[in-house]
């Protein structure tokens, strides 16, 4: 319990840091935007639009950080991993259907996990959202849950675009994104949350053929 407390304190500290940096960045950004609007007509309209959209992008990242950093203590309780995964899959269903994605799930015996249920569901959703984004023309996502010794093992496989070695190596690095509207925070958050639950995440991928993300979370027994 002490160990868990220490870890959640660390997360809280990182969160506070994120919030103060976000605030510091937001004020000068407002100034720049104001000045840019003033200069509006004197600037090449293409450059003006690009600068405005880059500012909007910065603003989106900063806002995300303010949300991430909002002090939210982790609430650890005994939860059924099966229920959390099924709930995440249910939330994912309408999006996957709309995008022509078939989800095949094989949910075996679930362990009880001492965890923050909202955070663990967030991890599952971040991984599923990435699979969806890797399948712009539809495809399949396989979700398998089984046990690996004392661990609950959940495997997400998509047959999407995959990642280059370089992208794979940098996975979990904040702000590293290959997507035009990505922020590169989804996998970082997933990794942070899993680490704080004494679990681990493994990602393997091949460009053009797909990606597998495996999550291991310790059961309570
Ligand atoms: P974002 O989705 O905002 O880009 P993430 O941290 O979730 O941020 O992902 C970082 C990058 O990792 C993505 O931009 C993408 O290049 C790559 N990635 C993550 N998951 C997958 C996946 N299932 N298939 C292909 N690439 C992926």
Image: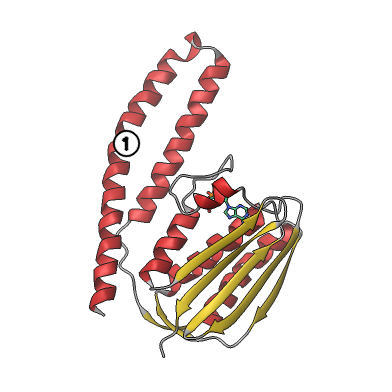
Is 17 drawn above or below residue 27 in the view shown? below
> Which image quarter holds the C terminus?
bottom left
Is 65 drawn above or below residue 204 in the view shown? above
Q: Where is residue 84? Give x, y as percent.
A: 52, 77
- Which residue is farthest bottom? 221
- Which residue is farthest front? 165
Is 7 drawn above or below residue 19 in the view shown? below
Identify the residue under disc 1. Answer: 25
The residue sitting at 68% across, 76% down in the picture is 105
The residue sitting at 49% across, 48% down in the picture is 184
- The local crowd at label 1, few if under 14, some if 14 to 19, many if 20 or more residues have their Cα within 10 Å, is some
Q: Nearer the viewer, residue 46 or 141?
A: 141
Occupied quadrant, residue 218: bottom left
The residue sitting at 58% across, 18% down in the picture is 46
Q: How many marks?
A: 1
- Which residue is farthest top? 42
Q: Where is residue 164? Give x, y as percent.
A: 61, 47
Occupied quadrant, residue 139: bottom right
Q: Nearer the viewer, residue 27 or 131?
A: 131
> Which image quarter holds the N terminus?
bottom left
């Amino acid at each position: 319990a002490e160990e868990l407390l220490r870890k959640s304190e660390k997360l809280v500290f990182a969160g506070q840091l994120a919030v103060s940096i976000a605030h510091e960045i937001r004020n000068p950004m407002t100034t720049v935007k104001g000045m840019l609007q003033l200069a509006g007509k004197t600037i090449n309209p293409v450059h003006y639009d690009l600068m405005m959209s880059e500012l909007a992008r910065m603003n989106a990242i900063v806002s995300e950080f303010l949300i991430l950093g909002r002090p939210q203590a982790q609430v650890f309780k005994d939860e059924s991993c099966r229920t959390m995964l099924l709930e995440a899959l249910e939330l994912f269903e309408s999006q996957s259907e709309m995008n022509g994605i078939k989800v095949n799930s094989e949910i075996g015996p679930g362990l009880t996990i001492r965890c923050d249920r909202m955070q663990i569901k967030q991890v599952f959703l971040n991984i599923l959202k990435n699979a969806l984004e890797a399948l712009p023309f539809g495809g399949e996502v396989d979700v398998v849950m089984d046990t690996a010794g004392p661990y609950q093992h959940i495997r997400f496989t998509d047959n999407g675009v995959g990642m280059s070695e370089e992208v794979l190596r940098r996975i979990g690095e904040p702000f590293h994104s290959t997507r035009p509207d990505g922020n590169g925070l989804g996998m970082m958050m997933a990794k942070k949350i899993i680490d704080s639950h004494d679990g681990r995440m493994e990602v393997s991928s091949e460009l053009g053929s797909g990606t597998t993300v495996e999550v291991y979370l310790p059961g309570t027994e």
